[in-house]
Image: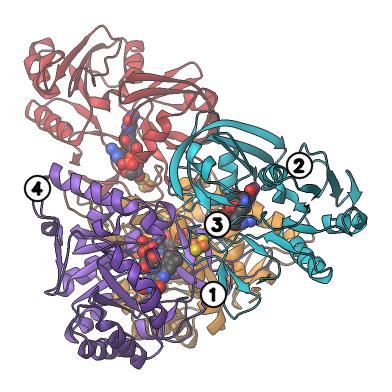
Chain colours: A cyan, B red, C orange, D purple
Amino acid sequence: MTIENYVILRNKKLTEKTFELTIDAPELARLSEPGQFCNIKVSGELIPLLRRPFSISQVSGTEVTFMIAVTGTGTGILAKKQTGDELNVLGPLGKGFGIDDTFETAILIAGGIGVAPFPFLINKLKEQGKEIILFNGARNSAELIKLNFENELNSTDDGSAGLKGNVIDLLHANRKLFVNKNVKVFGCGPHPMLKALQDYCSTGNLNCEISVESNMACGFGICQGCPVHSASEDKYYLICKDGPVFNSRDIIL
Amino acid sequence: MTIENYVILRNKKLTEKTFELTIDAPELARLSEPGQFCNIKVSGELIPLLRRPFSISQVSGTEVTFMIAVTGTGTGILAKKQTGDELNVLGPLGKGFGIDDTFETAILIAGGIGVAPFPFLINKLKEQGKEIILFNGARNSAELIKLNFENELNSTDDGSAGLKGNVIDLLHANRKLFVNKNVKVFGCGPHPMLKALQDYCSTGNLNCEISVESNMACGFGICQGCPVHSASEDKYYLICKDGPVFNSRDIIL
Amino acid sequence: MSELDFTVKIGNKLTLKNPVMLASGTVGYGNEISEFLDLSEIGAIVTKSISLKPRKGNPPQRVVETTGGMLNAIGLANVGVEKFISEKLPFLEKVNSTLICNIAASSVEEYTECVKILDKYKIIKGFEINVSCPNVKDGGLIFGNNLEAVAGITEKVRVVTEKPVIIKLSPNVSNIAEFAKVAKERGADAVSAINTLVGTAFDIYTRRPKIKNITGGLSGPAIKPVALAKVFEISRNVDIPIIGIGGISKWEDAIEFMIAGASAFQLGTINFVNPKAAKEILEGVKNYCLQNNIKEISGLTGSYEL
Amino acid sequence: MSELDFTVKIGNKLTLKNPVMLASGTVGYGNEISEFLDLSEIGAIVTKSISLKPRKGNPPQRVVETTGGMLNAIGLANVGVEKFISEKLPFLEKVNSTLICNIAASSVEEYTECVKILDKYKIIKGFEINVSCPNVKDGGLIFGNNLEAVAGITEKVRVVTEKPVIIKLSPNVSNIAEFAKVAKERGADAVSAINTLVGTAFDIYTRRPKIKNITGGLSGPAIKPVALAKVFEISRNVDIPIIGIGGISKWEDAIEFMIAGASAFQLGTINFVNPKAAKEILEGVKNYCLQNNIKEISGLTGSYEL
Ligand SMILES: Cc1cc2nc3c(=O)[nH]c(=O)nc-3n(C[C@H](O)[C@H](O)[C@H](O)COP(=O)(O)OP(=O)(O)OC[C@H]3O[C@@H](n4cnc5c(N)ncnc54)[C@H](O)[C@@H]3O)c2cc1C
Ligand SMILES: Cc1cc2nc3c(=O)[nH]c(=O)nc-3n(C[C@H](O)[C@H](O)[C@H](O)COP(=O)(O)OP(=O)(O)OC[C@H]3O[C@@H](n4cnc5c(N)ncnc54)[C@H](O)[C@@H]3O)c2cc1C
Ligand SMILES: Cc1cc2nc3c(=O)[nH]c(=O)nc-3n(C[C@H](O)[C@H](O)[C@H](O)COP(=O)(O)O)c2cc1C
Ligand SMILES: Cc1cc2nc3c(=O)[nH]c(=O)nc-3n(C[C@H](O)[C@H](O)[C@H](O)COP(=O)(O)O)c2cc1C
Ligand code: FES
Ligand code: FES
């Protein structure tokens, strides 16, 4: 865990509402693992007061990149940041994706901005020689954030790109790609999508990890603000510390 | 009174801590008189919440200029504004300097950033063919904001420019310049300076107008937040509406 | 547009053309703000608190900014009931405003006296009784935080007017619903909530309070969550129309107050920052209704889902 | 530097090396924050409220941001006294922290039981009794807003420990000084003020509260003026050491609290935003003292000029 002001190297627009912020952060880059996140102070002012959590989207050398969708005040301020501006970042935080088990094929499921942590994950999975299939869905083609990845399938709610339907439909439709393989599923996206994925994987008995969200005040375990209910015991996990990545069997969404 | 978003034409640095912001504001320019002020929203956020009052420093064609000293959060934000940024300005507000009476010589007394309203006042006085003497004091030469005005005398507390002493000392020292003339005094500056000027003019029986400050919430008479006590009755004037310029005989500082 | 019913009823006697009101003490007597707003389009304007005799108010400083809010200790500076009638009423009449007179006093008699005098003016559509000003030595919170006092004032004011009586409640209590209950029992037509929270600030170099009166009333966006909770508390416990006030700066805030239980809402501090706020918030609320297929704005009141 | 006496006494029994404390519920049990702060350098750390049995806490959402502040309804989630002793104490001992245990309970017996169990641990330097949590159904504000209850709890806790007893007061009352007075009379060594203000927020599309518990506790810079006024009110009316809490985000705020009457102060919400705040504020306060020729920090306490 580090806390530091970093210089912004680039702010790259991806779609109308999304962009990538890249900072130069050697120590943070060294410590980060796919699925972890950082908690970012969007301005030096007291409004917005709290930090905003964002997945670590990519690490390359000493550079760390976040992929961000504008949804409110804080992300709106971040969208306007320019090369040379400073950014106060707390991270890396939480537990990332488990990629050391014995699976052969990684199935990545992204809904909307949920694709954010996958560029970094893909890199690491490649290093380990895993096969990777990315199912990447969005509302429409304008909002779809395609990664430049060879094995990527897309869906859109309105059919303007890829399969018409949601990303779970896309998964269904392409079962044959992975049905007899030793797979592990990695999911990130909006709450309803994660619930559907949880069902899908529990029915199909697939090993699956999902990255979940919650309002957060601190991001590192001191406020108890980010509970998610355990599936096995009558207790809450903290999403920021015990997650944000959980085995989909372990939590009740 | 208008309220409008204006485009910033220039932000010109004057001294380490002062700068001039110029906006293109035809209607505001047309309505403004020397000594009036505007109430400016320094950012679109809720912090800082309230507008900040600034004298109208100069009007030239459709351009309106403010001369601003950085003293806190709001002025700090304004200092960073750039050409092309927008500024929400409410104005012109209050009652300005009275320049239609029969005096021949205008004596202008400025302390520190109190010089702000004088460029505009000087222009108007010149139009009326008045003689003008500007006594302009500051803490030191680095903080002194000289106007490019032919008849200007300076003082600094440390003697690094002009007379060593305050601006009232400077006035004393130069009595001969105006002692037998039909003068009117115009003062703007920090509270202690205005009090000293009030004394000086009451002793010397000089007609004097001073521009006074107060915390303000609204700037146009709806909050009652800016009282100054009347010298003749047991009541308060509102600085934003009845002032900010008062005859020095009319108020108790 | 023509399908949207924007009127709100506050009790049986008061109907406003829309729920947007201008809060007492934040728009004076309407003159200045009317340069930015057509007052005839606003639901209602509430006057600066009026007392029987003119009040000079507190010495400076009277206002200071805080994080997301401000403190004020104006001390009920006002022209007094007589001058209000002669100098301020004609303008408010001319611009066709819906007028609520806010009354402040240091004794029960002063409240009733004021109301009696003002009662005969047709343009005055109701009275808001300020029992909750934190910035005066006499009256103010001595009334507002005392159940008996609020009961007594309500009762006495009730008998001297047939017009709507709205009791403006203090948030500086642990049980605001009980105050609303007492107001209802003693004949109030509605309550408004909230007045300002008691707060202060010190200059760390002079060690003096930044407000001459020492404490002031905290208002503005900072207090919105507290105000909402108070409105909600009243709404769940007492069956009386509520006018929501506190920290509204955008239309979304206004909707929140209505959902929490308010029949109408007042804008205060935001008028200082954006004198056109009332108009903009009115538009925002209208659009929200249209987009969410709400035909009667009054249906929003207390429509929370728990 | 060596000339500046930074120690503060809170009553007769508790001396802190400096006035900076970390507020209950905002630093857990110290583990995580210790990555950013050397806890041995901080005046004291106050634990998350501990109850006799573990508490699961409230369901999500538990937190939401507001203008200049936040609402929380954690619901006193904590490991319980037993696990606290076995799993948390050793770490707090190891890092040489000055430890205050904050206790929450739903009955007087639970308070005394907890204190009795913890009393024997030397590292625990005092108890802060939370009678003011707004986010639990049992206990909480039912105690905190009731003078009798606060009196009873203080009295009973007093007899089971010789260590300093600090009563943490609720701001959701009209007369906080009376609560401080009762605490003093029944043997408390100090009071801390304030806990959070009751607040809420609604989602205008779902019409549901943004916090599952419906209401939450408002904290952060937004509440600073209210907290300062409460500290000042106690300070003027009751002769008891006060620990100031509420919205401190910079060293200037901390000085304001001391001037208003606080002997020490606690940092809460700001720890979430800037985990190094305690250290930075300590430095800022030190510099202020040096620059203003203050030799004993304790001289600041209640040094207001009116
Ligand atoms: C572990 C984690 C990783 C995330 N990774 C990404 C990412 O890589 N890219 C991305 O664009 N977004 C990501 N999000 C969501 C992102 O944090 C929110 O979109 C952002 O906080 C919204 O801030 P705002 O000020 O623009 O929105 P506002 O709605 O104005 O924010 C108001 C408050 O709500 C909170 N909030 C709003 N939406 C969310 C949300 N979905 N999750 C958590 N808190 C929320 C904010 O933090 C803030 O406290 C992540 C969230 C979590 C918890
Ligand atoms: C009629 C009038 C004309 C003015 N003209 C000028 C001018 O031309 N140039 C210039 O540099 N300054 C001028 N000032 C002072 C200027 O308004 C303050 O310096 C400014 O508001 C400080 O804002 P801040 O956020 O930087 O300071 P902060 O100290 O962070 O502000 C906190 C609060 O205090 C108020 N405040 C602080 N100092 C003053 C002050 N001196 N007067 C009034 N309110 C204050 C602010 O408005 C704000 O509400 C004028 C003030 C008035 C009343
Ligand atoms: C400067 C100022 C003056 C006020 N004067 C009065 C008053 O005279 N009578 C009254 O009932 N309320 C008065 N109030 C309280 C407001 O009407 C309102 O209840 C409060 O400010 C909360 O709303 P807001 O957060 O929208 O400002 C005043 C508020 C401010 C800020
Ligand atoms: C997330 C959160 C959890 C809290 N939990 C507790 C608690 O368990 N016990 C307690 O006495 N106070 C608790 N508090 C209150 C704080 O200790 C403090 O009194 C309050 O937040 C005001 O200070 P601040 O504005 O600096 O945050 C909590 C506050 C927050 C924000
Ligand atoms: S966000 Fe604070 S504990 Fe998880
Ligand atoms: S600043 Fe509001 S009346 Fe003068």
Q: Which dot, 2 or 1, sits closer to the camera?
A: 2
Q: Secondary structure at mark 1?
A: helix
Q: Quick one: label 3 or label 2, which is nearer the N terminus? A: 3
Q: Are marks 4 and 1 in contact (CB under 8 Å)?
A: no
**Distance CA(mark 3)–CA(mark 2):** 25 Å
**Residue sitting at the far top:** B150
- On whether ligand 1 comes within 8 Å of the CB at mark 3, the answer is yes
Q: Position of residue B75 (x, y in %)?
A: 37, 34
Q: Which dot, 4 or 2, sits closer to the camera?
A: 4
Q: Are marks 2 and 1 on the same chain?
A: no
- For image coordinates 18% across by 69% down, the residue present is D235
Give the residue type at disc 2.
Ile
- Which label number is shown at residue A94? 3
Q: How crowded is the residue under tag 1: few (<14 C-alpha within 10 Å), some, or many (20+)?
A: many
Foreground residue, D121 or B192? D121
Residue assigned mark 4: D2
Q: Secondary structure at mark 2?
A: loop
Residue assigned mark 2: A145
- For image coordinates 41% across by 67% down, the residue present is D28
Give the residue type at disc 4.
Ser
Give the residue type at disc 1.
Phe
Above or below, B162 against D55 in this view is above
